[in-house]
Image (cartoon, rainbow, N blue to C red):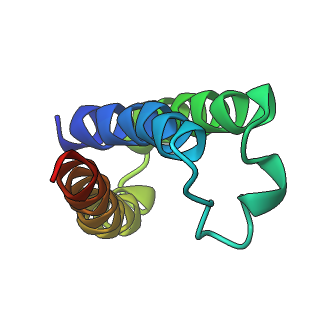
Amino acid sequence: MRWAVLSGLVVLDAFLTRDALEAGYRELNPLLAPLAGTPWLFSLKVVAVSLLAVAVALSQKSRRAGPMLERGIDVGLLVYAGVTLWHAALRISRAL
């Protein structure tokens, strides 16, 4: 279930990033900055979510991969929760 929440946050980040870029902000992630403002950014997010779903499905068959994947999902949740809060703060600051 946590992987589904993480997937939702990743896709939400793609939409919020597009909105922030249109408002004049820049992409702060140096790895994704070259893709900012292009359809490739959203495509990359969709591929990442798809790979996460495959990893979860495969880990259910392998006991060794499960714990490591669970820790990765937890880290991802923390990171994307922070990114979502950052986007919320940007929206609030724009509204003021």
Residue 67 in the image: state x and y as whole percent. Answer: 30, 65
Split into 4 quadrants, where in the image is the N terminus?
A: top left
Which residue lies at the image location 79% right of the left edge and 33% below the top edge?
A: 38
Above or below, 80 relative to 28: above
Residue 31 placement, left or right of 46: right
Above or below, 35 relative to 50: below
Image quadrant where residue 68 sits? bottom left
Residue 5 in the image: state x and y as whole percent. Answer: 22, 37
Between 63 and 36, the residue placed more toward the observer is: 36
Which residue lies at the image location 17% right of the left edge and 52% below the top edge?
A: 92
Q: How many marks are shown on the rendered structure?
A: 0
Residue 16 placement, left or right of 2: right
Above or below, 24 relative to 37: below
Which residue lies at the image location 47% right of the left edge and 35% below the top edge?
A: 19
Q: Can residue 11 be seen in this view?
A: yes
Residue 57 in the image: state x and y as whole percent. Answer: 43, 30
Residue 63 in the image: state x and y as whole percent. Answer: 35, 55
